[in-house]
Image (cartoon, grey):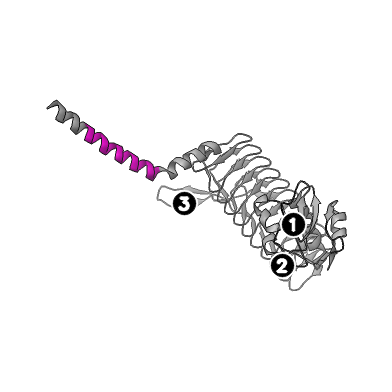
Amino acid sequence: MDFKATDIARFLNGEIIGNEEIKVSNVSKIEEGKPGTLTFLANMKYENYIYSTKASIVLVNRSFVPKEKIGATLIKVDDAYQAFASLLDLYTQAMSTQKTGIEQPSFIDSSANVGDNIYLGAFAYIGKKSNIGNNCKIYPQVYIGDNVTIGDDCTLYAGVKVYAGSVIGNRCIVHSGAVIGSDGFGFAPLEDGTYKKIPQIGNAVLEDDVEIGANTTIDCGTMGSTIVKKGAKIDNLVQVAHNCEVGENTVIAGQAGMAGTTKIGKNCKLAGQVGLAGHLTIGNNVIIGAQAGVPKSVPDNQVILGSPAIDIKDAIKAMTIYRNLPKLREEVIQLQKELNNLKKQINSAEN
């Protein structure tokens, strides 16, 4: 499907600089742009590519002023990154095949309620007394246990597992291999060195507009609920332990993990491989850098880094010192030699 520059600019409320009639049928990265594709420039460290890209149309911020001649047609918008995301959404809707109907073999328990206009893929399973909303897409080999509630307009990709009692809100997306409501890691040590499993009788709750990445696990509460609040986005391979709480519009990148009963506030950003100890409270608007280890609670509006995590300014200073340790060691050794020589000279003079 072709999209004309004028149509794209109208959709984005943008300003065209160049050929208004040029058409595109696909998207590309700016450094790999090809004729007939659309790309964008939001991060100025990629600016050099805009002068050589073969892409037909480039989205740029309104403030962008080129330093050289550009062969592509430009569409100036308020925010090039957000505009590109909106176009991708439109492109996906135009190109996607809307799946509907119930494929066989699949299983829906007679006590379950299923909404209108759903898609249920082959080998999917819906358990007793579960409720599935309207316009949901449940792909092949999805398991939905007993007493599960799923809202409207949700998508569960192939192989998702939703344990009994879990609650998923409206417009949620759960990617392949994710597990919602699995047992929390609860074991009581016994005198003989073995462990007794503590029954996990709570559930997991995803509020509206949550997205869960592939192979991520959201454990149920030991008692009560593990909650991922409205608008939160969780990447692939993330562990959310029992009775944790992820705040509204918080984003968590891949391979991050949190121990039980940790609570994360609103609008936080956790980079890859962040580890949170248990029973912590992370405030609102907190940013935690990659591979940070967080052993204690963090107040609102902090930016932290390192392991153990500290304020980012102090962390950068500490990293600079650590990087310079070999040089500092050599200097200390040299100073020690000079000091020893000076002591010998003093002793010789005294004798």
Q: CA distance from mark 2 to mark 1?
A: 55 Å
Q: CA distance from mark 3 to mark 1?
A: 70 Å
CB within 8 Å, label 3 to label 1: no
Q: Which mark is residue 207?
A: none
Three-letter code, disc 1: Lys
Q: Which residue is mark 3?
A: 195
- Residue depicted at x 44% and y 45%: 323
x, y percentage for residue 94? 83, 64
Q: Is residue 167 above or below residue 20?
A: above
Mark 2 or 1, closer to the camera: 1
Q: CA distance from mark 2 to mark 3?
A: 35 Å
N-term-proximal mark, 2 vs 1: 1
Magenta stretch encompasses residue 72: no
Query: Image quadrant of residue 129?
Result: bottom right
How many residues crowd around disc 3 within 10 Å: few (fewer than 14), some, or many (20 or more)? few
N-term-proximal mark, 2 vs 3: 2
Please give the range of residues in magenta.
Answer: 325-342
Q: Residue furthest bottom?
A: 104
x, y percentage for residue 57? 78, 60
The quadrant of the rendering that contains the C terminus is top left
106 and 10: which is toward the camera: 10
- Residue depicted at x 19% and y 32%: 345
Element type where label 3 sits in the image: strand
Q: Which residue is mark 1?
A: 69
269 and 189: which is toward the camera: 269
Q: Which mark is residue 124?
A: 2
Q: Is residue 245 above or below residue 158?
A: above
